[in-house]
Image (cartoon, rainbow, N blue to C red):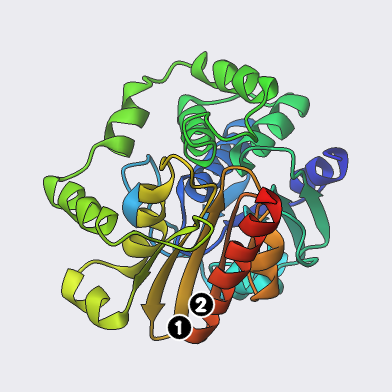
Amino acid sequence: MFREALELIKKFDTVIIHRHTNPDGDAIGSQVGLKHLIQTNYPDKKVYAVGDEAKRYSFMQDSVMDTVESETFANALSIVLDTSAKFLISDTRYTDAAATLRFDHHLFVEKICDVEVIDTSRESCCGLITAFALQSGWKFSPVAAQSLFTGMVTDSGRFRYDATTPETFRLAAMLLEQGFDINDVYSPLYADDFDMIKLRAQFVLEIKFTANNVAYIYTDKQRVEQLGVDTFTISRGMVGVMSDIRGVDNWVNFTETDQGVLCELRSKKYNINPIAVKYGGGGHQKASGATVPDRETAMKMLADLDAMCASQNN
């Protein structure tokens, strides 16, 4: 699976690395990690990372994106990471590259690149990149190792989600052996300003439940404007406040924006991905997302999640 990808990377003197928009720790971690892996093992290559700002993950080393002129793509390899659908890719100029390569761990939605390495058994794209680098015989710099470890931590929910395997821990241990301080990951990753802690408390008070115990929060545009924080913080950032409620197996966070209602779906037990796909989204079996046009459609999605719980409990 890795051989063709390795040969493609060896072939090009210029490599440009992409990932999805509104990046999470796995997107930034795999991007920065792969960039430093290639720079360490092929010092004569020019390697760039492109996309929108790291925002929440700007504490990560080398997370400021590079500026790349459009003509650079003509003779370059573009690598797309941690992305299941074309419309999610940050910096669409990957289509102008001489060749394209994708590494991803999401459920397959569509073919994006010339060569694709997809392994849905991995807890993170960072785990996939780590395995690829090991099999390729590459050396790991401390920055690469720390970046990849950060993505493994965030996408596995601190190694709690059931995609975590013995292999996950073996790779994580190997990364730790490269000499970075684990506190440089956990301290900035999980420390919050008091204002954010208060915001999370407000969202806890907004939780509602369907007849079959699907937890949900619905934040309309007026409320979003009142809160004064970006929609990503509200949508992706607050879905976790429902994750540890006893008796709740499925939960969803709805956030109204000018582009539609952002839907973050999660489950402890069930494959909720088909419901996300039904409404134009995708992701993982137990963590998926979609954007729907209006509240009415969002409530239909909620009804589908409720019906799933009803059928599973009977």
Q: Secondary structure at mark 1?
A: helix
Residue depicted at x 46% and y 29%: 146
Q: Which residue is mark 1?
A: 295
Q: Which label is found at residue 299?
A: 2
Q: Residue at x 63, y 37 (%)?
A: 123
Q: Amino acid at mark 2?
A: Met
Estimate how packed mark 1 is, as few (under 14), some (14 to 19) or many (20 or more) residues with alpha carbons within 10 Å.
Answer: some
258 over 145 or under it: above or below: below
Q: Nearer the viewer, residue 134 or 214?
A: 214
Q: Is residue 277 left or right of residue 91?
A: right
The residue drawn where x is 29% and y is 68% is 230
Q: Where is residue 308, by image quadrant? A: bottom right
Front residue of 151 and 192: 192
Observer-nearest of 305 and 290: 305
Q: Amino acid at mark 1?
A: Arg
* Crowding at mark 2 (Cα within 10 Å: few <14, some 14-19, many 20+): few
Is residue 79 in view from this perspective?
A: no
